[in-house]
Amino acid sequence: MANELSIPEDSVGIVSPLCARFDTPLTLKSGAVLPGFELMYETYGELNAARSNAVLVCPALSGHHHAAGVYADAPKNTGWWDNLIGPGKPLDTRKFFVISVNNLGGCHGSTGPMSINPESGKPWGADFPVVTVEDWVAAQSLLADRLGIDCWAAIIGGSLGGMQAMAWTIHLPARVRHALVIASAPKLTAQNIAFNEVARQAIITDPDFHGGHFYEHNTLPRRGLRLARMLGHITYQSDDLMAEKFGRRLREGGRKFSFEVEFEVESYLRYQGDKFAGSFDANTYLLATRALDYFDPAHDAGGDLAAAFAPATADYLLVSFSTDWRFAPSRSREIVDALMRKGRNVSYAEIESSAGHDSFLLDDPHYHAVLRAYFDNITV
Amino acid sequence: MTALDGRIDYDVIAGWVSPGARVLDLGCGDGALLRHLKDSRGASGYGVEIDIERVISCMRNGINVLQIDLEKGLYDFVDQSFDLVIISNALQTLHRTEKLLTEMLRVGREAVVSFPNFAFWKHRMAIMDGHMPVSDRLPYQWYDTPNVRFFTIADFEALCDKLGIEVRERLVLDDAGQPVTDEPNFLGSFALYRLGGGAGGSRG
């Protein structure tokens, strides 16, 4: 064992990112055509002989393919859903073969705005076509083909990841047996879209954005991306959690009667914003928020969400969190109700948590017990 | 609430479930009744439960379970969308009794209700002795009971009458689990009803 690196027993250990190249053109929902593309992904566990134990992990807004384990050259870079995935963890890699992807339009190696546009020989930048949740699913399905996975045992995702899981069950029903949809929604509300729009405006109006072609100017719309992330962070947390974590505490001493960082919460938001602005692509952020805005399966079914689920054959688990106001429990209930109307097998848990939308990334004991019980009952 | 009582209860209810029925079980606990109906009658459907530990137990039992607060009503459920809506040994733990009974018969074509009879003779004796009853059917002290409504067979039937709910079948058991025919409100400790009709709320 690699104990010298002090990797825990229930970690998937050292992992390596993989890249799949697709040379056939992909027509997107917008009508735009990508001549070819690459997807970054990671796998954990082993595909069984019957190829019946594969689980797809769909990333949320800022997620990527590194969901579990660590890299040999970066032992502190732990995957974003490492508390869920591993030997003995709720998504047990001794039973399941887990695949995690970086979606189209991403900024962690999959084809996206930072990639070279073959027509111009320059980075796509703002010219990268707008991608939708359904486009992501189409690209993921080509990866599944490549890996010889006809039918997923399960697809799991939180927030925007949950939307991908739902879209799979609607558009490729024969290819998924179980969908675990966590802290998600059947579509965004006007308020949700409004938050996204403020985030996008922060980026687009940053003078360093250069209409999305900032790579050519050797700069980044750092201020805009930072503001977008600060705003996002406020909505991912609950009022209670912020009160608990920061309250009205000042960083040092009393008031300075200035606009410098004085309150702890200001310091936290600036730190989160700076960290994100240095590691995430602004064009990808625009694309991902637009994918969220556009997701609305009921729209194509005359506004009737239950009708949208008519083709689905999967079993579902829905989970929401009591203090999530970005995608409140009532939004998950809408999905549950639509699925019940269609007679689908569905279970729903509403977890008491103070952590708001971000709860889906944490390891609350009840939340993880729910996921463990559900995964344990999936036959492979 | 003991395992033995549960099984007698379940067999009676199973007898009222037509094969392949769509069932909604309110206050479904760990899902044992639904599991029984699924295995013995090929029933499908959902359990509703508020307690997260029991929700997790249902999932372990492979039962569809929805963590919903019944005190908020069944407003999300479509009219007449289930063959049978069951509330087994849980009606006495909920406040909005009238609303719930009406809603059960709006959502389901029939309803099954079972509850402990507070007028059972041993319970009456406990009161005569000056104490709140504690028995197999009421296994709680007054200070830790989950029950919030205290009613008898006579009370329940009067409420059904008031709400226009039709009693289609009734089975009363004594504390040995044997059926009671004479003086059920005195000799019976537990009652099960199959109900139909009712005002039905906003039935469409």
Image (cartoon, grey):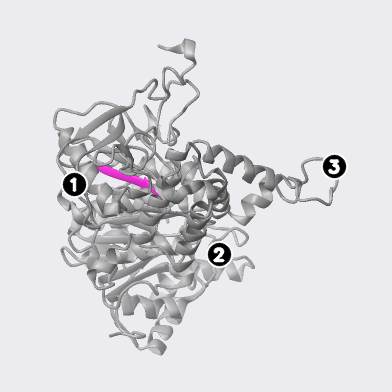
User: SS at mark 2?
Assistant: loop
Image spot of residue A17 (x, y percent): 33, 27
Is residue B152 one of those drawn in magenta? no
Q: Amino acid at mark 2?
A: Pro
Query: Is residue B36 something that shows in the picture?
Result: yes
Look at mark 1 in the image and give the residue it sits on: A26
Look at mark 2 in the image and give the residue it sits on: B133
Inter-mark Cα distance, 2 to 3 = 62 Å
Inter-mark Cα distance, 2 to 1 = 72 Å
* Up/down of A72 relative to A289, above or below: above
Look at mark 3 in the image and give the residue it sits on: A253
Q: Are marks 1 and 3 in contact (CB under 8 Å)?
A: no
Tell us which disc is closer to us: 2 or 3.
3
Q: Are marks 2 and 3 on the same chain?
A: no
Which quadrant is home to the C terminus of chain A?
top left
Image spot of residue A343 (x, y percent): 23, 63
Q: Quadrant of residue A64?
A: top left
Is residue A156 one of those drawn in magenta? yes
Q: What mark, if any, has residue B187 been given in the picture?
A: none
User: SS at mark 3?
Assistant: loop
Q: Which residues are magenta?
A: A154-159
- Residue at the location (41% across, 25% down)? A11
Q: Amino acid at mark 1?
A: Leu
- Front-most of A256 and A58? A256
Chain letter, disc 3 residue: A
Image spot of residue A244 (x, y percent): 67, 48
Chain letter, disc 2 residue: B
Q: Are marks 2 and 3 in contact (CB under 8 Å)?
A: no
